[in-house]
């Protein structure tokens, strides 16, 4: 294995670990910083905030994204909000409580030290964003407003209408623009990283393809930061933007970077149900809607074809309120999603195909008036109407769970460095803070914590020992990586078969959704493990990628991503099979409590599963990082 | 539903382009406009032809990537909304639909329906930010912002940076885009220290990028997917005049 597999959690009491780590970390002095070149791949909340902050500190940064502008990274689509433990509501919140909710929400499969640091930093993020001009919602007093999100009994979520991700990303895009103008950051839009370059056992560069011109380039640096987001699109249909993919992290994995918990996938309970075969994506209806919307299905199967208004109160099953009285409609995502699947499996689902449940605002409208609801969620109701043609002020929304977020990602230590020295991974691309299930409004928090506050303080710890070690792009390792990229591009174009990319991607997605989706079992996973290599083999025999490589070629761009998904899917299923327990979103049917909740096996599986690539066609090697809980007690999660 | 399509094809910036006729059949009314183009591309692929290049990413109206002119209207007929939020049920069965890129001199065509909007990034780089270093921010509630101002700032900040405003404007003006950013930041107390230099530099770069002037046709407002109000252009003009005046007074 390259490097070391050690989480490097600082010693000392939980609440002092980060402070004392900072006190003892190495530094790079201001006039030495410009001697270091840093590559940041990604311009979302994580990459954008990191690139801007590192530029501001005086490093020379090159930042890459595949969209035509840094501002279009997928973070732009986040709707609901961002958490922090400000306790502005005086409702009993604290850093400890945010930490505890997050680690419990993750079903005790994340590191205490990382999660505590996240909770500590969250408050600084809100301060930073306000200073940058993020127009968070405010009360009439002029003070900041909050709303509630799932998995918490306090109101700690900050938001900007239903466009929180957009506003946070514009804040960091603007900071990035400022650094671009100042010359500290050089931006490479529409440039895709296709390989990681390791020199003397350290990450020292990348190979990219310019998506406009097709030109392949080498970039050497002192360190490489990956902030390339999540890979939910492996399922084809998800709430992610069309371009989201696993390529950067997967190719790093193939160069020796450990990939952690790849099967941990969040299925979000409130999305607009699938409506047709040619659908290209699923649309999220923010979790914040569950503040005021009530989820229900008919009590009896026979009623599922009836108009919702014809089903009297007594014949409705508000199943979340019934099963989880203390959290009710705000039960965590994994639990709410499974509960929706369960009632639909029982034949009580509504809408076409019986794959839907109601999210009903009638009571809230009665209580608060339509205007208040419009003010809170107006844009979401409009989106719903555009897509379905229905007016949710009049009839309840129909929703169903959909793939939304990936907790898995490249393995990192406390400094957010991978086992490959010099490779840092931040944001959704790493595995670090959400365990087996992420709570709402905490991905934005993590991305910005990593980029604004953690990485700028941990990167010097590595860089301080790296003066003069930057290789030349002419080094043989760069040559080899470039040839590798070139060969792959040519191979994709050469197949010249008959089937379209989408047809393969759709087939893969459906297979994963069935076998490695909301619930999993050994037999299904084994079937998937058999089918995926077959599908991959067909792909390389029969895919058709039109056009050529020296051109703007959107099919070629996507072909590389689908090819990587076809390999990565196998790793996901292996991970899901190996984790012979249920935890959070990973629900193995073999392991459940009598009332159908996820049943963990802490004795055997309180660990991070980190996978090491052993070569094409070889089984990857599983490394386990045991999780030590010094502060919290492992309990059966209860939201009752 | 069936449709006749006339789509702009252009191999690259330097070669000439033209409208080419296509046909799609059996499209469900619940298909989005871009999904309809996906279907057409699959058909083209099967027929051994090159698919049509067009841009999109989030497909829910927020990332601002999609940029099509449909029947002469930026983002098509279903305002407010980006073209990715347009559904085929909005068209008549059998209709002929013309699809072109956003046509603005400052947005050169890359290929087919894909354009280069980096000019918009350069306007923001000129000053569309608040210089707040990570680490130096005060406690968030230490500065209150009247709700009215915060809400108005949010309305301006909602701009998705798609460039439809410039595409719809007979003069190819990017005033709505620029005014939204200037107004968003000028409405917040945090934006005040850089208020004058920001507007002066952004307007200077906007002009240098070759965008035209505003002559109050309000086409921009009509097509804006984020419903940015043209009243922000008036605010931009006031901010600009104010900054010029204060500069001339030596402040
Ligand atoms: C619809 C939706 C709503 C959400 N709402 C919320 C919410 O309310 N609250 C919350 O906390 N979280 C929310 N999330 C989750 C959250 O938005 C994401 O987890 C988070 O924004 C990810 O940020 P990121 O910076 O890690 O990645 P991204 O924003 O995905 O950015 C990835 C970047 O990497 C670049 N990139 C990727 N691969 C390559 C490559 N090979 N070469 C070059 N560049 C590359 C991309 O161009 C992009 O710039 C939501 C997610 C979705 C899908």
Image (cartoon, coloured by chain):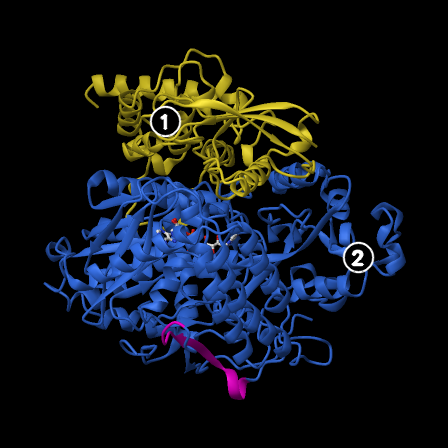
Chain colours: A blue, B yellow
Residue receiving disc 1 = B107
**Would residue A595 be visible to someone looking at this image?**
yes
Left or right of B7? Residue A332 is: right
Protein chain holding label 2: A
Could you tell me which secondary element the residue under label 2 belongs to?
strand
* Mark pair 2, 1: CA separation: 50 Å
| Residue A606 shown in magenta | yes
Q: Chain of mark 1?
A: B
Q: Please state the horizontal and vertical placement of residue A24, each as a whole percent of the image.
A: 22, 73
Residue located at (58% from left, 40% from top): B39
Look at the image and tell me in which quarter the C terminus of chain B lies.
top left
Question: Nearer the observer, disc 2 or disc 1?
Answer: 1
Queried on whether the Cβ of the residue with tag 2 lies below 8 angstroms from ligand 1, the answer reads: no
Q: What residue is rendered at 52% in x and 31% in y? A: B226
Viewer-proximal residue among B221 and A474: A474
Q: Name the one closer to the observer, A640 or A222.
A: A222
- How many marks on residues? 2
Give the residue number, with chain letter if any, for mark 2.
A297
């Amino acid at each position: 294995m390259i490097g070391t597999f050690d989480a490097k959690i600082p010693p000392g009491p939980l609440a002092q670990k980060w402070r004392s780590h900072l006190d003892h970390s190495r530094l790079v002095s201001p006039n030495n910083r410009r001697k270091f070149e840093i590559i940041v791949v990604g311009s979302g909340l994580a990459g954008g905030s990191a690139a801007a902050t590192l530029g501001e500190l005086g490093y020379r940064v090159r930042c890459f994204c595949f969209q035509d502008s840094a501002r279009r990274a997928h973070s732009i689509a986040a709707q609901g909000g961002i958490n922090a433990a400000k306790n502005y509501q005086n409702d009993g919140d604290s850093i400890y409580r945010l930490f505890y909710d997050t680690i419990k929400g993750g079903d005790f499969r994340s590191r205490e030290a990382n999660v505590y640091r996240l909770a500590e930093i969250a408050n600084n993020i809100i301060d930073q964003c306000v200073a940058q001009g993020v127009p968070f919602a405010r009360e009439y007093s002029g003070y900041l407003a909050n709303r509630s999100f799932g998995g918490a009994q306090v109101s700690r979520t900050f938001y900007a209408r239903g466009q929180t991700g957009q506003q946070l990303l514009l804040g960091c895009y603007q900071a990035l623009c400022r650094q671009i103008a100042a010359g500290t950051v050089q931006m490479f839009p529409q440039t895709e990283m296709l390989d990681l370059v390791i020199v003397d056992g350290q990450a020292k560069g990348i190979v990219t393809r310019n998506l406009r011109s097709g030109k392949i380039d080498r970039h050497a640096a002192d360190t490489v930061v990956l902030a390339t987001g999540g890979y939910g699109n492996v399922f084809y249909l998800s709430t992610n933007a069309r371009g989201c993919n696993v390529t950067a992290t997967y190719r790093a994995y193939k160069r020796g970077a450990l990939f952690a918990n790849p099967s941990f996938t969040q299925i979000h309970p409130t999305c607009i149900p699938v409506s047709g075969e040619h659908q290209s994506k699923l649309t999220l209806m923010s979790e914040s809607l569950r503040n005021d919307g009530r989820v229900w299905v008919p009590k009896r199967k026979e009623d599922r074809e009836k108009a919702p208004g014809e089903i009297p109160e007594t014949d409705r099953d508000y199943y979340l309120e019934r099963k989880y009285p203390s959290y009710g409609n705000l039960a965590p995502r994994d639990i709410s999603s499974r509960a929706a699947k369960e009632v639909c499996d029982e034949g009580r689902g509504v809408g076409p195909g019986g794959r839907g449940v109601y999210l009903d605002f009638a009571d809230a409208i009665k209580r608060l008036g339509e205007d208040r609801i419009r003010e809170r969620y107006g844009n979401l109701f409009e989106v719903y109407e555009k897509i379905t043609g229905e007016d949710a002020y009049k009839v309840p929304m129909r929703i169903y769970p959909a793939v939304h977020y990936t907790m898995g990602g490249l393995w990192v230590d406390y400094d957010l460095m991978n086992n490959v020295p010099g490779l840092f991974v931040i944001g959704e691309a790493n595995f670090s803070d959400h365990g087996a299930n992420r709570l709402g409004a905490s991905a934005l928090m993590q991305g910005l914590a990593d980029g604004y506050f953690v990485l700028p303080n941990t990167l010097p710890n590595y860089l301080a020992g790296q003066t003069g070690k930057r290789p030349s792009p002419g080094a043989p390792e760069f040559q080899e990586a470039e040839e590798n990229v070139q060969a792959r591009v040519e191979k994709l174009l050469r197949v010249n078969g008959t089937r379209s990319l989408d047809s393969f991607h759709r087939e893969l997605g459906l297979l994963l959704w069935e076998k490695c989706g909301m619930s999993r079992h050994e037999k299904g996973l084994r079937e998937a493990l058999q089918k995926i290599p077959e599908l991959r083999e067909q792909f390389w025999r029969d895919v058709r990628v039109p056009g050529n490589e020296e051109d703007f070629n959107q099919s070629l761009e996507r072909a590389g991503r689908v090819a990587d998904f076809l390999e990565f899917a196998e790793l996901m299923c292996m991970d899901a099979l190996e984790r012979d327990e249920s935890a959070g979103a990973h629900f193995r049917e073999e392991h459940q409590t009598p009332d159908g909740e996820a049943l963990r096996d802490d004795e055997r599986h309180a660990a991070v599963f980190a996978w090491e690539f052993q070569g094409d066609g070889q089984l990857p090697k599983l490394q386990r990082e045991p999780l030590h809980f010094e502060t919290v007690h492992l309990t059966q999660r209860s939201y009752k | 539903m069936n449709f006749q399509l006339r789509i702009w094809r252009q191999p690259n910036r330097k070669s000439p382009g033209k409208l080419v006729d296509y046909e799609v059949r059996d499209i469900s009314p619940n298909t989005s406009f871009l999904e309809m183009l996906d279907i057409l591309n699959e058909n083209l692929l099967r027929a051994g032809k090159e698919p049509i290049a067009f841009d999109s990413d989030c497909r829910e109206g927020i990332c601002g990537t999609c940029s099509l002119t449909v029947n002469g209207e930026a983002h098509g007929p279903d305002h407010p909304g980006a073209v990715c939020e347009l559904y085929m049920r909005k068209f008549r069965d059998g209709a002929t639909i013309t699809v072109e890129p956003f046509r603005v001199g400052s947005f050169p065509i890359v290929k087919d329906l894909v354009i280069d909007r980096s000019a918009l990034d350069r306007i923001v780089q000129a000053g569309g930010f608040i210089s707040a270093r990570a680490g130096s921010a005060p406690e968030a509630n230490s500065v209150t912002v009247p709700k009215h101002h915060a809400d108005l700032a949010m309305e301006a900040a909602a701009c998705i940076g798609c460039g439809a405003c410039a595409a719809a404007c007979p003069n190819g003006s990017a005033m709505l885009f620029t005014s939204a950013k200037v107004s968003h930041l000028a409405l917040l107390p945090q934006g005040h220290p850089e208020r004058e230099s920001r507007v002066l530099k952004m307007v200077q770069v906007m002009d240098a990028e070759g965008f035209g002037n505003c002559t109050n046709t309000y086409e921009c407002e009509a097509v804006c997917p984020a419903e940015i109000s043209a009243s922000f252009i008036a605010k931009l003009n006031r901010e600009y005049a104010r900054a010029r005046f204060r500069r001339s007074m030596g402040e």
